[in-house]
Image (tube, rainbow, N blue to C red):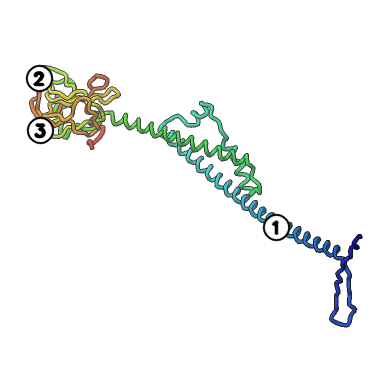
Amino acid sequence: MKRLKRKKHITLMVVPDDTGKVISVKLGARLLLGIFALWCASVLISAFIITRHADYRTRIAYDNYLQQKHKDFAKEMIETRDTVKRVSEIDKQLRDMLSLRSRNAIIKYTGFGGPSYLDTKLLEKSVKDNDEVISRRSFELAVQYVQDQANDSESSFQEIISYITEQRARLTAVPAGWPVKGWITASFGPRIDPFTGSLSYHAGVDIANDIGTPVKATADGVVVTADFEAGGYGNLVVINHGNGYTTKFGHMIKYVVSPGQHIKKGQVVGYLGNTGRSTAPHLHYEVKLNGVAVNPVKYLNKEIALK
Ligand SMILES: [Zn+2]
C-alpha cells in the first residue's frame, strides 16, 4: 500500500508587543529549505565578491606602487645617463690633452652604433611630463645608451692608461740629469789630448769629484757592458736605454752591475775612480743617439738632479 507523503509545515509567527494582530505565516518545509539554501548561496556569493574586491584593491595599490617604481627608475636612469655623458666628456678632454684620436672618431670608423643621446630624450620627456605609463622602448633605449657609454668610457680610459704608461716608459728611457755629483773638467768635442798633446775628439764630458762618489744611471735600461779596459775606459759600464740611446760610464773605481741587468733611472752602477787612461779622479760620461756621440751637457741639464 502506497504510503501517503505527509506534507510538513512550519508556521512562523510574528507577535507584536502591543495588542496588534499576530501575523502568522505557514510555510512548507521544502520552501523553507529552499529559502535557507538561497540565503547560504547569497552569503557565499557576497563573501566571494568581497574577497575579489579586496584583491582588486590590493592589485590597484600594487599597480600604483609599480608605477611609482617605474617613475623613480626612469628618473635615476636619466641621472645616470647624464653622469655617463659627463664622464665621456672628461674622456674627450683627456684625449684632447694627450692629443689622442677622439674616441668618437674611432667609434664612427668601426661602424659601431647603438642608441644615441637623442634616443634617450623619449625617457627624459616621460620623466618631465610625469607620465603615468612609461614605455618599455624608452627604457630599453636609455639602458642601452648608458651601457654603451659606460663600456666605451672604460675601454677608452684603459687606452689612455696604456698610452700614459708608454709615454712615461719612453721618458724614463731618455738620459736626463747628472750621473754623478761634481764639476765638468773636460767638455764634449775637439780638444787637446791630455796624453798625446795632439788634437783629438772627446766623445763625452768628464765630471770630477772624490773617488768613491756614487755613479747613477740617468735613464732606465739594460746593461750591455760591465768590464775593465786597461788602456782606455778602465772600469766601464754601458747601458742601452732603447729608442736609440746608450750611455757610457768610464774610469770608475768599480762597477756594481752586470751585463743583461735591468737598471732603473737613479740606480747606482758604480763609483767614481781613476782607472784606465785617466790623469785624475773623474767620470767619463758619454751619451750616444743611434750610435753617434752627442753632447751630454744638454741631457745633464734636463733635470736638476737625479733622485
Ligand atoms: Zn773623458
Neighbours of disc 1 within 10 Å: few (<14), some (14-19), many (20+): few
| Quadrant in the picture for the C terminus | top left
Mark sitting earlier along the chain (3/2): 3
Residue 230 higher or lower than 303, as above or below: above
Secondary structure at numbered mark 1: helix
Q: Which mark is residue 51?
A: 1
What amino acid type is highlighted by mark number 1? Thr
Residue 77 higher or lower than 306, as above or below: below
User: Disc 3 beta carbon < 8 A from ligand 1?
Assistant: no
Name the mark nearer the viewer: 1 or 2: 1
Secondary structure at numbered mark 2: loop
Q: Which mark is residue 231?
A: 2
What amino acid type is highlighted by mark number 3? Ile
The answer to whether any part of residue 295 appears in the image is: no
User: How far separated are the C-alphas under marks 1 and 2?
Assistant: 110 Å
User: How far separated are the C-alphas under marks 3 and 2?
Assistant: 19 Å
Residue located at (29% from left, 31% from top): 172
Indicate the position of residue 235 as horizontal and vertical percent values: 13, 25
Identify the residue position indicated by label 3 in the image.
211
Neighbours of disc 3 within 10 Å: few (<14), some (14-19), many (20+): some
